[in-house]
Amino acid sequence: MRDEPRDADDDPELSAARLRGRRVALALVTVLAVAFIASSTSQITAAVFGFGFEPLPAGASVGSPEHLCAAGIQGLARALDRAGRLASVASAASDDDTTAVLRPGLSPEWDRADEVRAACDAAQGGPSAWASLQRLRVAEAQSGRLGRDDLRSVRSDVAAHLPADLR
């Protein structure tokens, strides 16, 4: 008898090795998927319920970056609210029109927004407070579509970043 080459499918050792390889690959993909889902869930939960953000510290000394950031954000948020009321009265047709109506109402507070941002960049908890203010600014620009009541949660997010005495 002549030795004939055996089919790879007929070799039980080779079939078992392929099966083990498939199982290992499937286990690896499953572990990666579960890790991705867990990470996404924790990030979304933190964002939705406000866990993990660092509010600006209360009682910061006058002139400190924390105090300058908190006072600046409070003033900028009030200017946005004031300008937003004016824009809602004007009832602009598009976001660009709303922004054009908002812009004059933002002065003089927003003229020094770069100074406030610099203070917030140096303050503990400042970058997240600045980001919440920017979300409010974008929402105000879209308030023609959203409606003033829809901005309540964005405003409360900004307030949550401020110390209690500045809310």
Image (spheres, helix red, strand yellow):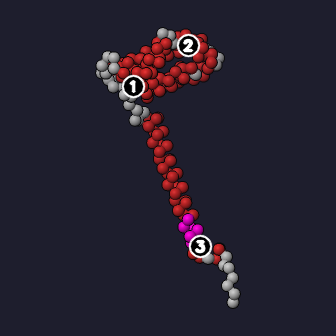
Stretch of the chain drawn in magenta: 15-21
Label 3 Cα neighbours within 10 Å, binned few <14 / some 14-19 / many ≥20 = few
Q: Which residue is mark 3?
A: 14
Residue drawn at (57%, 75%) of the image: 13
Circle 1: element type: helix
Is residue 29 in sight in this rendering? yes
Circle 2: element type: helix
Q: Which amino acid type corresponds to the residue marked 1 in the rendered image?
A: Ala
Residue 77 image offset from top left, x and y in percent = 46, 18
Q: Which residue is mark 2?
A: 103
Q: Is residue 21 above or below residue 95?
A: below
Residue drawn at (42%, 25%) of the image: 121
- The residue most toward the front is 2
Find the distance from the CA under tag 2 to the CA under tag 1.
27 Å
Q: Quadrant of the image for the C terminus?
A: top left
Sequence-wise first label, 1 or 3: 3
**Does 120 sit left or right of 58 as displayed?**
right
Residue drawn at (46%, 35%) of the image: 47
Residue drawn at (67%, 76%) of the image: 7
Find the distance from the CA under tag 1 to the CA under tag 3.
62 Å
Sequence-wise first label, 2 or 1: 2
Q: Which residue is mark 1?
A: 122
Q: Which amino acid type corresponds to the residue marked 2 in the rendered image?
A: Arg
